[in-house]
Image (cartoon, rainbow, N blue to C red):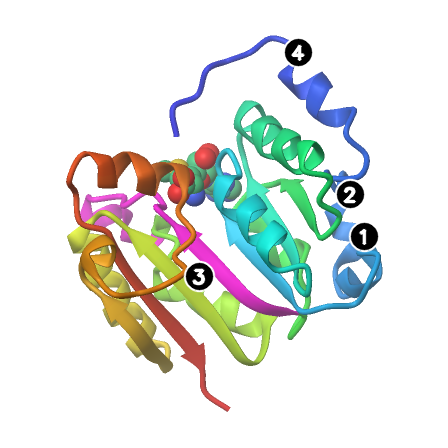
Amino acid sequence: MRRRKKPGAKEKLLTHELHLCKEPEKYKGHWQGYFLEKKPIHVELGTGRGQFITTLAAKHPDINFIGIEIKEEILLKAVEKAVAQGLRNVTFLWYDVNKLDQVFAEGELNRIYINFCDPWPKARMAKRRLTHRNFIEKYKTFMGEQGEIHFKTDNEKLFEFSLNEFAACDLRLKNIIFDLHQSDMKDNTTTEYEDKFAAMGMKIYRCEGRKRN
Ligand SMILES: C[S@@+](CC[C@H](N)C(=O)[O-])C[C@H]1O[C@@H](n2cnc3c(N)ncnc32)[C@H](O)[C@@H]1O
């Protein structure tokens, strides 16, 4: 996501108490105690400006959501969306997805969303893709039985790679869609990137991988 360095963004972000978890390591293994009510926990990696996760949080008060984003200026926009809507079932981490094992313990998540992550197109950088098997094996440990990964991208090669990685990690593939916006899938919640790419006439690819019991 294009980054516009904004002076004061970090300070402004850190003023948010209710929608920014500043010491997420403290909640490793205790995320159910962080939220007002115990509910299944869904996480979005690289949440960007938060359109997707705040829309889902408003639609699904029965779920607690955590959005993770590394860039503070961008995360500030997501936090401000949650504040403006008065959402209490979503929080955000200013954090690097590479360090997820410092904030989540075994089995405490129910679903992970990965939307329009960097495709890292060069083969030598494949391990940086958030759908590389090294990441997927970690996500699997954070998720309980029947945990799911939901993935969307505009990049066909990344999609093919990810389908293979999901299968190699023994996830049961479901709802594989090669052109989401021309499909009959109902109730698709779009992301900022998805809206942009779809408006340019690009195909959106989507799949789910479910942990086997
Ligand atoms: C291409 S954007 C997609 C944003 C949003 N998911 C969407 O679909 O509109 C990818 C986002 O992931 C964030 N990101 C990239 N690497 C990350 C990392 N290691 N940890 C956390 N966020 C990361 C970027 O800052 C960026 O906002």
Q: Which mark is residue 8?
A: 4
Q: Confirm or reject: label 3 Cβ below 8 Å from ligand 1.
A: no
Give the mark, 1 or 3, whose residue is nearer the N terminus: 1
Which of the 4 image quarters holds residue 185?
A: bottom left
Under tag 1, what secondary structure? helix
Residue in the picture at 23% in, 65% down: 177
89 relative position to 26: left or right: left
Label 1 with label 2: CB-CB less than 8 Å: yes
Residue tagged by mark 2? 23
- Tell me the amino acid under the disc marked 1: Lys
Label 3 crowding class (10 Å Cα cut-off): few <14, some 14-19, many 20+? some
Residue tagged by mark 1? 26
Label 2 crowding class (10 Å Cα cut-off): few <14, some 14-19, many 20+? few
Label 1 with label 4: CB-CB less than 8 Å: no
Q: Is residue 108 above or below residue 52?
A: below
**Looking at the image, can residue 46 be seen?**
no
Q: Confirm or reject: label 2 Cβ below 8 Å from ligand 1.
A: no
Give the mark, 3 or 2, whose residue is nearer the N terminus: 2
